[in-house]
Image: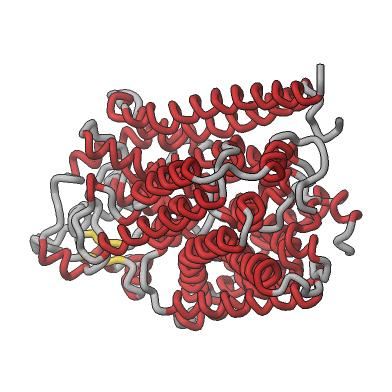
């Protein structure tokens, strides 16, 4: 099989065979489980099989051509680019932590769902088609050429590296968690094993390899996410399609939450101290509050995640790979379509998990049962052993109340199959899906960082005369170095997955959102303005995050997850004021802006 | 009609479409959820529905609609890639 023009024309067939092959593999594992093969081996086989496939795609897609390496030859069809973007986008946080977050933190947490999907409207209408017409290889490439000068390019590289690096440590962390669980090895070793898989995919073939691996990873992760949701909905008797059945289930959950005392029966201080970082259920799934502060917090989180989506370089660069401006626009629609297949299911999964744990009429429920019975359950023991959950009988009555049960949000997805009593093969599938989600995002992020360093910093700023072979060599060395640094930081486990992800979004929107948008939409924006906007927005945002993290009381409820609310306005105001105070951009730049506003004609850089 | 004014008209139409898209986006992203608590009733979890499903579905439709409208604007003023 050659991955040339023939491959592009046969994409449908290739991925159909792949999907059938994967489903066949899942069924085979199911048969092996029935035949009595041990769970550990099944977990191993899932991880080994999927990672081998990704590596194989990486080898088949190897390339020495710079257009193939940086933008996959600009020949990826809109639908497949949509799938690849979905995998690129849906990280370990989306796959592992999202449903768990909704479970534990209730309605306020659903702001992430709105923010992480609505941002694509901004991508489609304000940024992606114009950057595609511009024809750059990287996001700093656009900033550097639009505003001119090495300083603007360098600022964009710095913002990109900080935002993406924050994000990538969270992904490598997620990869390590899953690898450690499925392969029963130490977390640190898991991190390095996961990294080796990630690098193998992206080193040889750059964007081309990452694109086709991400499509394959999307298929694995979406199958792995949807099967348990559908299974649970049917098992609990709420109906065939969980997305339609979830609303009745929500009403039932709300009823249970009020009788069980969610939000009123809070954990005692001693119990919480004993549980450490694990959390008890304190907010209901549909507790939309009418208070000003709650509304404001929902609004600010949505806004920060949306603007972050529209400024994260690893997402934007996916739209550089389409064959036309029109295809880039459509591809944004397809991206969100494929993303929503998972995001629409996350609240359903949270709701059904709640039902299966809280509803006394369901056999798997644990709240209201005796502590002795619950602690003898196999899945409770397994996840207690790895420190993911804990039962503290705070009033000593021998019954598990809502404020006695502490857990980590991650286990909602990872342990759901076991909680709901599904066969182990589903757990293996979920592990493979979580790994695919974390790996595909890490791939995209590492590539974005390495390309910015090799293309923008090395080729454009340090040594513009360097030949292609050496550029690509530098790009690959950068990939190795950044990957290793990321793994090193991830193995220190500084922040949780979600905190790091939200920070990355705020770094990106504080530094890049307005320079990108105004670069297309405001001809008057000039170099001095853009540099002031990037340095000011990013600098003030980072300073605010530092102050909040070191104990300052957040202003107006703007905490570390939302520091873009500080960085973005600073960036906008500085950019507008400084641009107006300095000379307008030259004739050539204005012509360039006009040319990227229409799809017709050649790309500005080729 | 000169090419210059075609291009200007194309950009004016593009700006109108983008503006309209962003208004719909803002309503679905912010206004609806600001009133989230009023959407809930005894028989239907409206806030949960809009945050977990309604907004997302509207966003997907909105992007495809925007994309097809923009393509016809490009064609109408002779600014599409085929021209």
| Vertical placement of residue A492 versus A365, above or below | below
Of residues A481 and A210, the one nearer the viewer is: A481
* Location of residue A494 by image quarter: bottom left
Q: Position of residue A200 (x, y in %)?
A: 68, 75
- Answer left or right for B23 relative to A293: right
Q: Position of residue A323 (x, y in %)?
A: 79, 46
Relative to A88, residue A33 above or below: below
A495 with respect to A240 (left or right): left
**Which residue: 35% across, 56% down?**
A540
Judging from the image, the colouring scheme is secondary structure
Residue name at image x 61 percent, y 32 percent: B63
Q: Quadrant of residue A52?
A: bottom right
Question: What residue is at 86 percent from the left and 30 percent from the top?
Answer: B83
Q: Residue at x 38, y 48 (%)?
A: A570
Q: Is residue A560 something one can see in this rendering? A: yes
Q: How many marks?
A: 0
Give the farthest residue toward the top: B1
Q: Nearer the viewer, residue A408 or A339?
A: A339
Q: Nearer the viewer, residue A18 or A400?
A: A18
Where residue A368 appears, as percent x and y from the top left, is 20, 52
Q: Position of residue A229 (x, y in %)?
A: 49, 47
Q: Quadrant of the N terminus of chain A?
A: bottom right
- Above or below residue A285? Residue A542 is below
Can residue A436 be seen?
no
Is residue A190 left or right of A200 when viewed as pictured?
left
Q: Compared with residue A216, is residue B48 higher up or lower down, i.e. above or below? A: above
């Amino acid at each position: 099989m050659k991955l040339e023009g023939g491959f592009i024309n046969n994409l449908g067939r290739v991925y159909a065979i792949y999907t059938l092959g994967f489903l066949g593999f899942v069924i085979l594992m199911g048969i092996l489980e029935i035949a009595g093969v041990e769970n550990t081996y099944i977990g191993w086989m899932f991880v080994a099989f999927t990672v081998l496939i990704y590596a194989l795609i990486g080898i088949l897609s190897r390339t020495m051509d710079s257009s193939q390496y940086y933008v996959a030859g600009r020949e990826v069809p809109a639908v497949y680019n949509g799938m690849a973007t979905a995998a690129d986008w849906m990280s370990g946080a989306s796959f592992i932590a999202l449903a768990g977050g909704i479970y534990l933190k209730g309605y306020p947490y659903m702001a992430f769902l709105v923010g992480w999907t609505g941002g694509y409207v901004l991508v489609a209408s304000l940024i992606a088609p114009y950057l595609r017409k511009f024809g750059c290889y990287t996001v700093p490439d656009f900033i550097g050429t639009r505003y001119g000068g090495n300083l603007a390019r360098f600022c964009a590289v710095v913002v990109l590296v900080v935002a993406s690096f924050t994000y990538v440590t969270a992904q490598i962390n997620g990869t390590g968690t899953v690898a450690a669980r499925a392969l029963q090895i130490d977390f640190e070793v898991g991190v390095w094993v996961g990294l080796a898989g990630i690098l193998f995919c992206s080193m040889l073939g750059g964007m081309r390899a990452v694109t086709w691996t991400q499509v394959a990873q999307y298929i694995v992760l979406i199958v792995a996410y949807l099967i348990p949701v559908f299974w649970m909905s049917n098992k609990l008797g709420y109906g065939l399609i969980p997305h339609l059945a979830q609303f009745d289930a929500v009403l039932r959950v709300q009823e249970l939450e009020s009788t069980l005392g969610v939000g009123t029966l809070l954990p005692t201080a001693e119990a919480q101290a004993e549980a450490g970082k694990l959390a008890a259920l304190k907010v209901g799934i549909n507790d939309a509050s009418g208070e000003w502060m709650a509304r404001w917090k929902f609004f600010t989180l949505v806004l920060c995640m949306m603007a972050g989506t529209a400024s994260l370089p690893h997402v934007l660069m996916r739209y550089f790979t389409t064959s036309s401006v029109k295809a880039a626009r459509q591809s944004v629609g397809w991206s969100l379509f494929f993303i929503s297949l998972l995001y629409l299911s996350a609240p359903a999964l949270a709701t059904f998990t709640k039902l299966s744990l809280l509803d006394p009429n369901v056999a798997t429920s644990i709240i209201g049962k005796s502590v002795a019975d619950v602690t003898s359950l196999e899945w409770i023991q397994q996840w207690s052993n790895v420190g993911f959950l804990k039962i503290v009988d705070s009033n000593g009555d021998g019954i598990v109340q809502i404020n006695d049960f502490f857990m980590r949000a991650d286990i909602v997805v990872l342990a759901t199959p076991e909680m709901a009593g599904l066969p182990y093969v589903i757990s293996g599938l979920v592990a493979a899906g979580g790994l695919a989600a974390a790996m595909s995002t890490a791939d995209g992020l590492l590539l974005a960082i390495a390309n910015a360093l090799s293309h923008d910093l090395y080729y454009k700023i340090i040594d513009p005369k360097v030949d292609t072979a050496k550029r690509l060599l530098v790009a690959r060395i950068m990939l190795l170095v950044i990957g290793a640094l990321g793994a090193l930081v991830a193995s220190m486990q500084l922040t949780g997955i979600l905190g790091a992800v939200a920070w990355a979004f705020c770094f990106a929107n504080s530094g890049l959102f307005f320079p990108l948008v105004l670069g297309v939409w405001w001809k008057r924006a000039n170099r001095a303005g853009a540099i002031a906007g990037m340095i000011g927005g990013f600098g003030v945002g980072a300073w605010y995050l530092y102050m909040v993290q070191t104990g300052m009381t957040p202003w107006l409820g703007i905490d570390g997850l939302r520091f873009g609310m500080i960085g973005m306005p600073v960036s906008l105001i500085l950019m507008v004021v400084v641009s107006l105070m300095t000379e307008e951009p030259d004739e050539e730049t204005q012509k360039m802006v006009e040319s990227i506003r229409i799809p017709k004609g050649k790309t500005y850089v080729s | 009609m000169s090419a210059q004014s075609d291009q200007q008209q194309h950009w004016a139409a593009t700006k109108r479409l983008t503006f309209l898209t962003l208004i719909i986006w803002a309503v679905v992203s912010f206004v609806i959820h600001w009133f989230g608590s009023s959407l809930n009733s005894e028989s239907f979890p409206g806030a949960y529905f809009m945050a977990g499903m309604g907004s997302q579905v509207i966003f997907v439709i909105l992007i495809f609609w925007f994309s097809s409208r923009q393509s016809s604007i490009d064609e109408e003023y002779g600014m599409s890639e085929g021209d």
